[in-house]
Amino acid sequence: MKANNRFEKEPNQDYVTQFTKAEFVLSAPKLTFCPEDNLPEFCLAGRSNVGKSSIVNALTNQSKLAKTSNVPGKTREMNYFRINDSWYLVDLPGYGYAKVSKKEQQRWGQAMTEYLLKRQQLCLVLIVLDIRHKPHESDLDFMFWLAENAIPFANVFNKADKVGKKHHHDALVSLKELHEEMNIEVPVISISAQKKDGLTDLENLITEFIDDVPEA
Ligand SMILES: Nc1nc2c(ncn2[C@@H]2O[C@H](COP(=O)(O)OP(=O)(O)OP(=O)(O)O)[C@@H](O)[C@H]2O)c(=O)[nH]1
Ligand SMILES: [Mg+2]
């Protein structure tokens, strides 16, 4: 079958990761458990099941580094991966997962808020969205909250292999309109973690932000 957008149906054989060294470091239930060195870090946030952990694996070309699942709610703590000995990629648990108890959701909300507000070396929050669906109210709330608190973020549309060209285009346009309404400029990238498409754009975005970190 012919692919109907630039995201091919077969895994992209041409993708060569720049992130050749990747190792799991620790799982942190809250800020005080996060690594104490000052390496720059990037976190993957978003609703459950959008593919955050799959992105860790795709970017590092290791199929089992982060645990993925088709059952939402797999990731329960902040999982730290050190990349090329020089920065951290942090896989966060998904928000908006109804099956987690109210108490657990509350604990998480507090831990996340503290982490996002106080983690000085956090360069950029990568908010992952499933391109098949309109951003959920919880995504919008999260984006508004980050903007209000001047925490830089980018949007990463994942699962682009699942949609056609028109849907892809419309999703990008409406997200850009949302950013205009919010009066903010936010990088937007679309990828397929599964087919390894668009990953070079994501790598380049991360690399650009690392380059902007002032020397400690
Ligand atoms: N078609 C398609 N499926 C994907 C893609 N990325 C991830 N998936 C699938 O989506 C499901 C969820 O992936 P995860 O990476 O576990 O999602 P997560 O966001 O880490 O989920 P939580 O840990 O529950 O927050 C899995 O079945 C993946 O195989 C993609 O690019 N395309
Ligand atoms: Mg996960």
Image: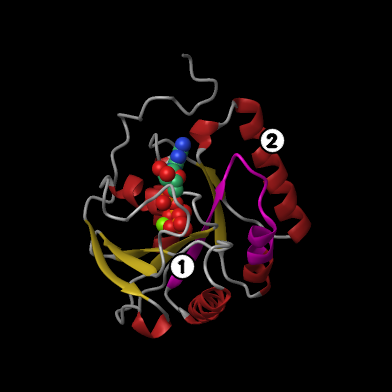
Residue 59 as seen in the image, left or right of residue 142? left
Task: Say whether marks 1 and 2 touch (CB < 8 Å).
Answer: no
Which mark is first along the chain, 2 or 1?
1
Q: Is residue 64 magenta?
A: no
Q: Residues within 10 Å of mark 1 (few under 14, many from 20)?
A: many
Farthest residue in the right direction?
181
Residue 17 as seen in the image, left or right of residue 181? left
Quarter of the rendered image showing ligand 2: bottom left
| Residue 100 in picture, x, y percent from top left | 52, 67
- Three-letter residue code for mark 1: Cys
Q: Which residues are magenta?
A: 122-143
Query: Compared with residue 95, is residue 193 higher up or lower down, i.e. above or below?
Result: above
Identify the mark at residue 123; answer none if there is no mark: 1
The residue under the point 23% across, 50% down is 20
Farthest residue in the bottom direction?
32
Question: Disc 1 or disc 2, which is closer to the eye?
Answer: 2
| Residue 48 in picture, x, y percent from top left | 51, 56
| Residue 89 in picture, x, y percent from top left | 36, 62
Residue under circle 2?
A: 170
Q: Residues within 10 Å of mark 2 (few under 14, many from 20)?
A: few
Locate the C terminus and report the quarter of the image it occupies.
Answer: bottom left
Is residue 205 at all visible to an observer of this figure?
A: no
The residue under the point 57% across, 70% down is 151
Element under disc 1: strand
Residue 104 as seen in the image, left or right of residue 164? left
